[in-house]
Amino acid sequence: MLGRMIAAAAFLLAATPALADSSRCVEPIPPASINGNTATEQQMKDAIADFKTFQQASDDYQSCLLADLKAQQLAAAKAKDPKPLDPSVAAGVDARIDANQKLKERLGAELNAAIIAYKSKHPGQ
């Protein structure tokens, strides 16, 4: 009986691979922007650290999405009746990765602008 329930659960997981990426990969929360004209040195250090943490979390998120997509493609190919994975799944993953990458680039540019502004207000630091 327990074996049948495990087999049924495994079948359901294999039959619904599109659900895997939404539950396992968590999009990172972006750090707050900082005003380099008014920030203290400690606030700037914290903002840089927060961005580095976000950057690493974003890289991990994108890797997770790609790994889940590959797992879904493999599961589809190994299914009893193999079929290619619905192209919309890959397109959705690509869109999520692209959006996250653009956010990471935008936040990096904002942080660089804040650093430049801070340095112009605090020469020699």
Image: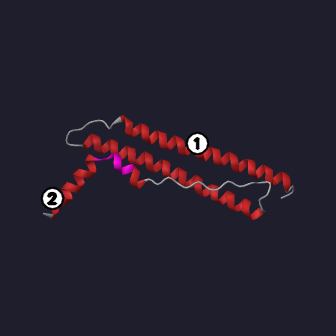
Label drawn at residue 4: 2
Q: Is residue 20 found inside the magenta-colored segment of the image?
A: yes
Query: Distance between the Cα atoms at labels 2 and 1?
Result: 46 Å
Q: Position of residue 54 (x, y in %)?
A: 58, 55
**Few, some or many residues within 10 Å of mark 1 (<14, 14–19, 20+):** few
Q: Amino acid at mark 1?
A: Lys
Q: Position of residue 42 (x, y in %)?
A: 74, 64
Q: Which residues are magenta?
A: 16-21
Q: Residue at x 56, y 44 (%)?
A: 101
Q: Position of residue 73 (x, y in %)?
A: 33, 41
| Disc 1 target residue | 102
Mark 1 element type: helix
Q: Nearer the viewer, residue 67 or 12?
A: 12
Q: Amino acid at mark 2?
A: Arg
- Specify the farthest residue to the left: 1
- Magenta stretch, main secondary structure, is helix
Q: Is residue 42 found inside the magenta-colored segment of the image?
A: no
Q: Residue at x 54, y 51 (%)?
A: 58
